[in-house]
Image (cartoon, grey):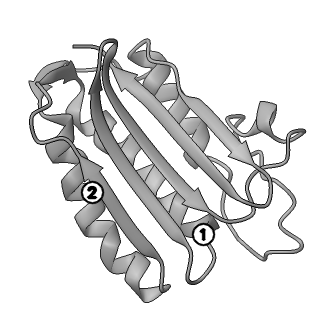
Amino acid sequence: NQVAPHYEKFFISELVADATQHYSVIAKEKNISLQSSISTTAPMVEADISLMERVVQNLLSNAIKYTPENGEITVNVKEQSSGIEVEIENSGEGIRQDDLPHIFDRYYKVDKSKSGIEGTGLGLAIVKKILDLHNIQIRVNSTFGKSTSFSFSLPL
């Protein structure tokens, strides 16, 4: 409740393309294929650009963190009737069904004893809080042992 969004019009497709370009360097170091399909004709959206940038960065950072070497990340931005959908999907272990209800809780981390992945457990909590400030719902779809995707839609 300490942050009030500053709404302005911008192209979410450009913001996601820039972030994807930046994170492609990090992905390459880990031998991760980072592919994107970003609509160049999607209209402008109205949101807090710096907060949306943080959302995309946190989701990309998480995707890289949880994608194994030689894995894949796909970033999609497409126009739909409900708005502009942003989706980030990564291959890897996925998220266990019993962990899914808690992944947006502050400081919650799934059992890392096997994978050795470190983190504070704040990235997804921040994503959820920012999207809540914008009245936007985050969706997660995970198949354990295969992949995880996070998506949200910005209204037109």
| Mark 2 or mark 1: whose residue is earlier in sequence | 2
Q: Which residue is drawn at 31% across and 35% down?
A: 52
Residue named by callout 2: 19
For the residue marked with disc 2, what is the amino acid? Ala
How dense is the environment of label 1, judged by Cα within 10 Å: few (below 14), some, or many (20 and up)? Answer: many
- Say left or right for 155 vs 147: left
Q: Is 12 in front, or is 149?
A: 149
Residue 154, quarter of the rendered image: top left
Residue 1 seen anywhere in this rendered image of the structure:
no
Q: Which tag is nearer the camera, tag 2 or tag 1? A: 1
Looking at the image, which residue is at 30% across and 13% down? 81
**Amino acid on which disc 1 is placed:** Thr
Q: Which residue is drawn at 68% across and 65% down?
A: 92
**Element at badge 1?**
loop
Look at the numbered disc 2 and give the secondary structure of its residue: helix
59 lies above or below 79: below
Q: In this view, does 51 lie to the left or right of 104?
A: left
Residue 109 location (% of width, % of height) = 78, 52
Name the residue nearer the viewer: 128 or 98.
98
Identify residue for label 1. 67
